[in-house]
Image: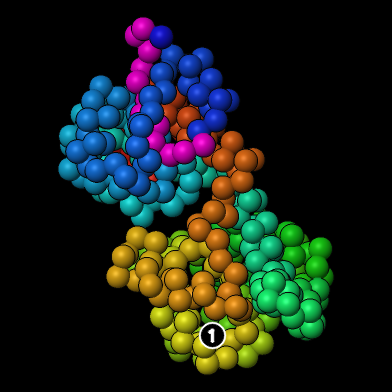
Amino acid sequence: MSGARKILVTPPNFDAAAIGFLGERGCRAVFSDKAEGALSEADLAALLAGAEGWIIGPQAGVTRSLIAAAPSCRVFSRRGVGFERVDVDAARELGRVATIATGGNEDSVADEAIGLMLAVGRRMREQQLALLAGDWSIRVGTDLFRKTVGVVGLGRAGRALVRRLRGFDARVLAVTPRPDIEFCREHGVRVVDLPTLLRDCDYVSLHAPMTPATRHLVGAGELATMKPSAILINTGRGGLVDDAALLAALRAGTIAGAGLDVYEGENDPALKQTALDLLALPNVVGTPHSAASTREGLARTNLIAARNVVAVLDGDDLPRDCVVADGRV
């Protein structure tokens, strides 16, 4: 593909359909021999030489210095919806575009949230560990059917979860800064404040974005207000929950269990042990920030990320909710 526009792709599982789309639009996908998380900033700067776009996974940081070191790279396209590791101010000030793959993975995340609710509520991990130890006694779990479920954040993933909860005849409470009145009315969602939601719910599922205002949204004080039978689910962002406080609450029996896909220790080595201590508890079911990583979810987000790159390079309009920084004049 002589003359094709170079696009660096660093996340794993970038499928043939997305590669083919780039090729059809005059782009050439290039890959690294190293895993994204093992790439230093110097490695990335070298890989970005001559690249006009970069499709990025969850383990690469897009820093001001890296953006400045890649003058040909016009668009930084996250495969996913989190952009905490992208310096959006620098992208804007240096005349670049930063995008996310909105609309690709919320159904996968909502499925995982339901799965974690069922797994923790039915004590599946505890029962399997007991079976492996030769103990075939029954450990009584709890239903999701007709329970009160709190959804913190009614973005795409939160709304997808609400739609699924209708199949369980659940009563849904929600915390959201901008209520969609029509959606809430259609799905029987009652919008409340966070203290009410935590106090009244049997399951609490977090889907808020990570911002300075939402850091440690659920800490020791909040956990203390929950029912002893309540279950906390976090498929949102590590940092929404104070993991040390959650560990203490679970050990003390303040709440019954937790289902976790994200952790504070993901990006902070000092907090890694807390995450491991949580995962060691029999009433915690954990996954490695993989809620969005189904075959179908990745295929959708790969293609959205590729489309965002091509739209910028071709001067076409971008979906408004995919743009997190636009420094073009």
User: Is residue 107 rendered to the left or right of residue 100?
Assistant: right
Q: Residue at x 48, y 81 (%)?
A: 246
Viewer-proximal residue among 319 and 284: 284
User: Which residue is denoted by mark 1 in the rendering?
Assistant: 250
Question: Does 226 sit above or below residue 3?
Answer: below
Q: Secondary structure at mark 1?
A: helix
Q: Quadrant of residue 160?
A: bottom right
**Foreground residue among 215 and 50:** 50
- In the image, farthest residue toward the front: 134
Q: How does the figure colour the protein chain or chains?
A: rainbow
Q: What's the magenta region?
A: 2-13
- 115 or 286, which is in the foreground? 286
Q: Above or below — where is 93 with respect to 169?
A: above
Classify residue 235 as left or right of residue 243: right
Q: State the image coordinates of residue 191 (x, y, percent, origin top left).
A: 62, 74
Q: Quadrant of the C terminus?
A: top left
Q: Is residue 73 above or below residue 64?
A: above
Q: Amino acid at mark 1?
A: Leu
Instruction: Using the rendered view, name the quadrant where residue 116 is placed.
Output: bottom right
| Direction from residue 147 to residue 19 in the image, left or right | left
Place of residue 112 in the rendered image (x, y in percent of width and height, measured from the top left) = 64, 59
User: Is residue 202 found left or right of 69 in the rendered image?
Assistant: right
**How many labels were placed on the picture?**
1
Could you tell me if residue 146 is visible in this image?
yes
Q: Residue at x 36, y 7 (%)?
A: 2
At horizontal 50% and vertical 33% (from top left) the residue drawn is: 14
Q: Is residue 257 magenta?
A: no
Q: Can I make out residue 123 in this image? A: no
